Amino acid sequence: MSGGESLIDAGLAAWLEASDAPLEIDFGCHRGAFLVGMAALHLDRRFLGIEKQVDRVDKCNARIGREGLANALAVAGTGVEALAVLPAGCATVFHLSFPDPWPKRKHAGRRVFQAAFLRQVRRVLVPGGVLKLMTDDRPYFEEMCQLTAGGWREVPWDDGRERVETAFEITFRKRGVAPCRRALCAV
Ligand SMILES: C[S@@+](CC[C@H](N)C(=O)[O-])C[C@H]1O[C@@H](n2cnc3c(N)ncnc32)[C@H](O)[C@@H]1O
């Protein structure tokens, strides 16, 4: 695929309808290290990457093509609008790993994890679906914890499945930084 997949592209709807295998969303999938790694490990599940940078979407889909994975797809999309077009209850797991932290106070409004985004995450998750949050940025993590303080309960991070690390997770671990992380289930 080339030119970046658009979320309004009928290709996404067809891909979603082609299988009823459990779907995991990797929001901000970058160049697909986690998305493609997980799809290769778990062929019985589907992995949808959403990424605002079209060149990265293309890199993901090229990688998916090279590995011959029918259970993964990356699409171009930005922020909460990218979630609003997805069907309700379509996903079993929603991964948000190392979202851009926008550390300056004047830029905090640019952070993707906000109340409207969280409402969309809840909408796209199946009942009992899990939201997995990970960041190196402590203040952002605390904000995430505050936003999920009501209506969500913490569940174990380790779900017993084999997983690959995200690209940023690898980078931060090499620097000796243990990421903040939390798995949550809507109540
Ligand atoms: C810091 S990187 C983390 C990448 C990856 N999740 C990881 O853990 O290695 C953040 C990624 O999210 C994408 N991104 C940032 N803001 C976004 C937004 N509002 N909507 C969609 N993607 C976004 C960036 O282009 C980038 O690829």
Image (cartoon, rainbow, N blue to C red):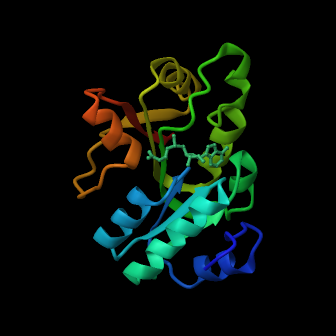
Q: Is residue 124 above or below residue 132?
A: below
Q: Is residue 145 above or below residue 28?
A: above
163 left or right, relative to 68: left
Q: Is residue 16 above or below residue 128?
A: below
Question: Does residue 69 appear anywhere in the picture?
Answer: no
The residue positioned 67% from the left and 47% from the top of the image is: 120
19 left or right, relative to 154: right
Q: Residue furthest top?
A: 105
The residue positioned 61% from the left and 80% from the top of the image is: 1
Residue 26: % across, % down: 50, 55
Depth check: give the residue in front, 14 or 105. Answer: 105
Residue 52: % across, % down: 66, 53
27 left or right, relative to 79: left
175 left or right, relative to 75: left
The residue positioned 56% from the left and 29% from the top of the image is: 101
Residue 181: % across, % down: 38, 33
Depth check: give the residue in front, 51 or 26. Answer: 51
Depth check: give the residue in front, 131 or 110. Answer: 110
Q: Is residue 47 above or below residue 169?
A: below
The residue positioned 66% from the left and 32% from the top of the image is: 114
